[in-house]
Image (cartoon, grey):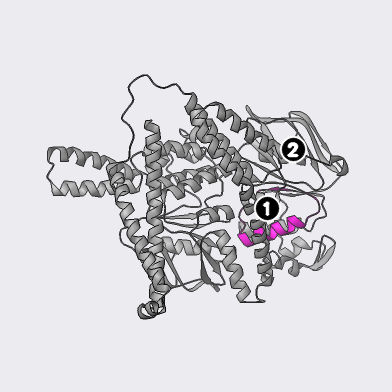
């Protein structure tokens, strides 16, 4: 069911056309990702959907009485609010509904036959069910923990950094659960563990979501549809990022020779996905099966927990081998390096070698010390203890502040400071426009001042400039921030061709998986772990180890001697729904079977219309999948509650 429709909408900024007579629909339960180049109109489309941006032509239709909320780029909070208060204040409507529910319940006890009170109670109950408000305090506590805000809960929210304030705003929005949630780059300022929690919450709570993101794994895990903004038009693709790539490639193949460069990049993406993600999934199948079997054993036999932990730790160590050091040039050698910031230990007794062709991703939670390691390698700061030996080589450095750029110079002056119009890239002389075209800059940008460019455009200039330098080692601090997906593809292509070492900090799991051959993982408390696994595979094993620790804690926990509290069980409404769903699902399956039979019978589908039958079948199949998913979720919840009562 449609919640928001845009019909024939057009939008221009002065002479630049952004959207040209576009139609867009957001249905209830959809999670739609908007993709496209920077400046193509992604954020403009989202703001028009939100109702905060005017448009030149067309119509915006919104279903009555729905709430639409958008995550602001720069949140604003009252000066007196602490972090916890700022989150609770965003939940005022939910808390008011809970308070009213308790009042109405008390009144019904005195007047049980009042139809008005019963109707209000049902309405309030449905509202609180939808918003998951019965255990809202537990949810607040968890979101504080998962977004790394617990330590700041009593601090004034306006004393936090911009990224931390965005996490506070995001936490409040998620707990509000509006009818339509709009998120512009929600994974910015989140480390990988926070992103995993965000994905889990979005999928569990079934938000209707419209979002802009350059995080391709996030899109793949979350999106039910991808909408591409390109050349003033919208094009829709069903599924996540992998499906988008496949459908886009098919579309481009149908257009034959057009967009050959983009097709090449898309093929590289898809080939990497097949080689990397699917191969990793295949490798994991045996371990997954073993994990599930041993988890079951663990519930009965605590010794099994130790067995599986040893197996997983052995699997991690298996990848921590470094061969052929003597045959490769050593760029950096770290011996027992330690570094603290105040009382916080960031790096403790870390030893490693970085070789001439290494590609290393530095990953871990925010504030763990990743950028500190980059500064140590660059010589900008010195270790408290230990030795860093540096070979004779040159470094190209990309920092988030883009210090290599001069806002007063234009692009020509930036790339050709000694005059002329040619640049040398890895021994090849190129016209500056031809080179910058590879980084998606049109010719009219050559005379633009750096200071007039957006953050994403400045990042593109800085990266393009970096590849014109003759260096042996690239050190990159969050290079994908503020970049769109097409530009990240280009960055990946250049990094894969680079003949030197690449050391980078990033939270982008897809980017790390695709580029890095080694990981430096900041575990906290100064511990830095090396791994040759893909980042995704490492994270999966870490997650399984955390689950085992949780099982072990529950197994070792002594049984309470006192009488237990009431056995947890499904609510009356959930139990009733669990009983209602099987006959509804069976009825849909019978109708689906009848329609499939009709599509196999020319007489039937000619009489009823093949398009009509196909559309009806698709709608029934979608409804069947939705009900089946709901039934499975209730069954799993019932099993979990039954297990708790055993």
Measuring from the top left, give residue 116's x and y in whole percent.
15, 49
Coordinates of residue 264 in the picture (x, y in percent):
69, 67
User: From where the camera sits, is residue 458 visible?
Assistant: no
Q: Is residue 617 left or right of residue 449?
A: left
Q: Earlier in the sequence, mark 2 or mark 1?
A: 2
Please give left or right for residue 384 compared with residue 1 in the image: right
Q: Residues within 10 Å of mark 2 (few under 14, many from 20)?
A: some
**Residue 102 x %, y %:** 24, 39
Does the magenta run of residues contain 546?
Answer: no
Which residue has dot 1 on it? Answer: 514
Whether 480 is among the magenta residues is yes
Quick check: 1 left or right of 555?
A: left
Q: In the depicted view, which residue is nearer to us: 186 or 534?
A: 534
Q: Residue 241: name its quadrant.
A: bottom right
What kind of element bears circle 2? helix
In the image, 546 versus 509, the foreground residue is: 546
Q: Position of residue 284 (x, y in %)?
A: 61, 45
Q: Which residues are magenta?
A: 475-501
* Residue 376, label in figure: 2
> Secondary structure under badge 1?
helix
């Amino acid at each position: 069911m449609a919640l928001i429709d845009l019909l024939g909408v057009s939008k221009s900024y002065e002479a630049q056309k952004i959207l040209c007579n576009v139609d867009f629909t957001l249905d209830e339960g959809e999670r739609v990702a908007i993709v496209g180049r920077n400046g193509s109109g992604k954020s403009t489309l989202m703001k028009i959907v939100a109702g905060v941006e005017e448009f030149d032509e067309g119509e915006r239709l919104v279903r009555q009485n729905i709430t639409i909320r958008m995550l602001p780029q720069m949140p604003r909070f009252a000066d007196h609010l602490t972090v916890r208060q700022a989150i609770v204040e965003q939940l005022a409507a939910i808390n008011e509904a809970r308070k009213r529910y308790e009042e109405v319940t008390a009144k019904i006890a005195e007047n049980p036959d009042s139809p008005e009170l019963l109707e209000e109670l049902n309405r309030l109950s449905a509202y609180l069910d939808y918003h998951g408000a019965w255990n809202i305090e537990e949810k607040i506590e968890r979101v504080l923990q998962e977004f790394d805000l617990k330590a700041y809960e009593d601090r004034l929210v306006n004393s936090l950094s911009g990224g931390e304030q965005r996490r506070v705003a995001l936490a409040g929005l998620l707990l509000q659960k509006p009818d339509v949630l709009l998120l512009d780059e929600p994974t910015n300022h989140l480390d990988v563990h926070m992103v995993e929690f965000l994905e889990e919450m979005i999928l569990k709570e079934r938000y209707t979501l419209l979002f802009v993101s350059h995080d391709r794994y996030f899109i793949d895990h979350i999106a039910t549809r991808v909408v591409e903004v390109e050349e003033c038009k919208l094009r829709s693709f069903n599924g996540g990022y992998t499906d988008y790539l496949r459908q886009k490639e098919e579309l481009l193949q149908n257009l034959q020779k057009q967009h050959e460069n983009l097709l090449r990049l898309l093929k590289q993406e898809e080939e990497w996905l097949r080689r990397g993600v699917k191969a990793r999934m295949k490798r994991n199948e045996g371990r997954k099966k073993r994990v599930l079997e041993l988890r079951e054993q663990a519930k009965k036999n605590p010794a099994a927990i130790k067995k599986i932990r040893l197996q997983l730790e052995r699997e991690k160590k298996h990848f921590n081998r470094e061969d052929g050091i003597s045959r490769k040039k050593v760029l950096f050698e770290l011996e027992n390096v330690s570094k603290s910031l105040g009382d916080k230990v960031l790096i403790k007794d870390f030893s490693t070698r970085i070789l001439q062709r290494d590609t290393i991703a530095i990953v871990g939670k925010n504030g763990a010390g990743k950028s500190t390691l980059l500064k140590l390698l660059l010589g900008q700061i010195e270790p408290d203890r230990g030795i860093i030996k540096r070979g004779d080589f040159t470094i190209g450095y990309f920092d988030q502040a883009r210090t290599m750029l001069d806002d007063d110079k234009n692009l020509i002056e930036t790339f050709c400071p000694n005059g002329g119009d040619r640049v040398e890239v890895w021994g090849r002389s190129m016209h500056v426009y031809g080179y910058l075209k590879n980084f998606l800059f049109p010719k009219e940008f050559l005379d633009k001042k750096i200071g007039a460019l957006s953050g994403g455009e400045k990042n593109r200039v800085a990266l393009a400039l970096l590849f014109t330098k003759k260096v042996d080692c690239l050190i990159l601090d969050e290079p994908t921030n503020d970049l769109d997906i097409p530009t990240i593809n280009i960055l990946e292509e250049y990094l894969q061709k680079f003949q030197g070492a690449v050391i980078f900090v990033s939270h982008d799991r897809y980017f790390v998986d695709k580029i890095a051959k080694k990981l430096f993982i900041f575990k906290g408390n100064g511990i830095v772990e090396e791994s040759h696994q893909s980042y995704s595979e490492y994270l999966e094993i870490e997650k399984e180890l955390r689950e085992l620790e949780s099982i072990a804690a529950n197994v070792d926990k002594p049984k309470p001697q006192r009488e237990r509290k009431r056995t947890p069980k499904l609510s009356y409404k959930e139990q009733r729904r669990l009983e209602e769903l099987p006959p509804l699902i069976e009825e849909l399956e019978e109708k689906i079977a009848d329609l499939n039979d009709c599509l196999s019978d020319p007489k039937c589908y000619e009489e009823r219309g093949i398009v009509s039958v196909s559309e009806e079948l698709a709608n029934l199949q979608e409804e069947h999948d939705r009900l089946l998913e709901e039934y499975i979720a209730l069954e799993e919840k019932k099993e979990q509650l039954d297990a708790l009562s055993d």
